[in-house]
């Protein structure tokens, strides 16, 4: 593999914005948009934890950006750019780097973001990646996961559970004849650009699993949540998998859809803000503690674990 500086010059300097100063200095210089507040988020991806060794490098790069872009979407922020950190073993060659940087370039164009800088190192084992995304919001307009109020409806964007089922398909544990579930696992769609300020009480992206992320919202607001499993939207490909995958769908994570607390009477405003993106009401916040998932018959459903465990 090429040395660190030639690697940066060849694969990453072409992706840098003016703020990155050609990636020849030790830090970037960024002037925030006038009258806006910065929003920052960081996420990492580790080989064999967040992606499989045989995954396409370009898709790994795009998913790395999109996981972080989803965090900005949950804050109602407009993306600006990112810092990138990579640690690669000697077995990673030039072809991998070329595909990886091409994937970054592809999504930079889609989401109108630029590379500001970062760090490149070697790894003694597996690939380790990290991206820090920067965005901006109007002063005081950043959304929070902690603002739900009793009586707020619980809404989600898109469909839930596709990525978790797609991972099962990639591991050979589930049939995916259309390839839709696999694609959703490899490449999420961050819901950036939605005008949610003034419409939602709270927001979080579904990364660790619907039940677990809803639990984070409940804990932050000091409330409980009641949802109907039958209302949680499923894609046609997930419906084909049957009822046996319900727990995987609700706890598997990696969807990067938005989970929203919506005050009564704001449903139409939410639909208008989301445009062509489907949104579905699945339950309600109320006094109490914890997340309660009910079957269509009204009985309580219990799961082995509510979502992804980081430790």
Image (cartoon, rainbow, N blue to C red):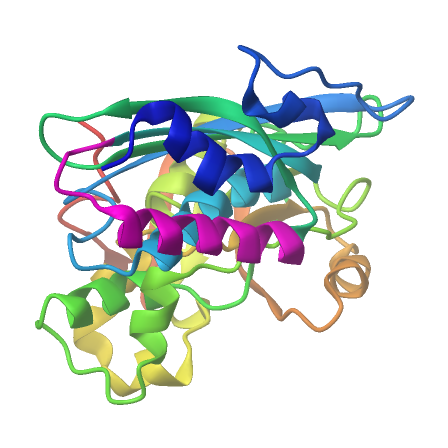
Q: Determine which quarter of the picture holds residue 201.
A: top right
Percent x, y of residue 244: 16, 74
Is residue 95 in view?
yes
Q: Residue at x 46, y 27 (%)?
A: 42
Q: Quadrant of the C terminus?
A: top left
Q: Where does the magenta region start and end?
A: 88-110
177 vs 172, left or right, is right
Q: Residue at x 19, y 42 (%)?
A: 47
Q: Residue furthest right?
A: 35
How many numbered marks, from 0 up? 0
Of 197 and 150, nearer the camera is: 197
Of 83 and 146, nearer the camera is: 83
Magenta stretch secondary structure, dominant: helix
Up/down of 309 relative to 94, above or below: above
Q: Residue furthest top?
A: 26
Q: Residue at x 53, y 10 (%)?
A: 26
Residue 307 in magenta?
A: no
Q: Residue at x 59, y 24 (%)?
A: 40
Percent x, y of residue 261: 62, 45
Q: Determine which quarter of the picture holds residue 88.
A: top left
Residue 102 in magenta?
A: yes
Percent x, y of residue 163: 33, 63
């Amino acid at each position: 593999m090429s040395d660190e500086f030639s690697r940066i010059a060849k694969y990453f300097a072409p992706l840098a914005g003016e703020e990155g100063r050609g990636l020849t200095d030790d830090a970037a210089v960024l002037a925030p948009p006038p009258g806006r507040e910065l929003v920052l988020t960081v996420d990492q991806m580790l080989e064999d934890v967040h992606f499989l060794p045989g995954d396409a490098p370009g898709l790994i790069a795009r998913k790395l950006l999109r996981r972080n872009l989803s965090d900005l979407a949950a804050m109602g922020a407009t993306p600006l750019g990112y810092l990138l950190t990579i640690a690669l073993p000697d077995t990673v060659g030039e072809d991998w780097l070329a595909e990886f940087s091409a994937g970054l370039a592809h999504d930079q164009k889609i989401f109108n973001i630029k590379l500001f800088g970062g760090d490149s190192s070697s790894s003694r084992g597996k690939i380790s990646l990290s991206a820090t995304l920067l965005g901006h919001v109007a002063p005081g307009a950043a959304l929070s996961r902690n603002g739900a109020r009793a009586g707020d409806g619980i809404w989600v964007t898109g469909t839930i559970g596709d990525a978790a089922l797609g991972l099962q398909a990639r591991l050979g544990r589930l049939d995916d004849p259309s390839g839709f579930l696999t694609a959703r696992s490899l490449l999420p769609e961050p819901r950036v650009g939605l005008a949610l300020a003034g419409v939602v009480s709270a927001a979080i992206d579904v990364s660790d699993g619907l039940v677990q992320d809803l639990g984070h919202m409940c804990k932050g607001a000091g409330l409980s949540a009641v949802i109907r499993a039958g209302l949680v939207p499923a894609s046609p490909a997930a419906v084909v998998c049957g009822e046996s995958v319900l727990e995987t769908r609700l706890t598997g994570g990696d969807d990067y859809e938005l989970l929203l607390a919506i005050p009564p009477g704001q449903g139409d405003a939410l639909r208008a803000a989301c445009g062509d993106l489907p949104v579905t009401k699945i339950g309600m916040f109320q006094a109490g503690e914890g997340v309660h998932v009910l079957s269509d018959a009204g009985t309580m459903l219990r799961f082995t674990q509510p979502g992804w465990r980081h430790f």
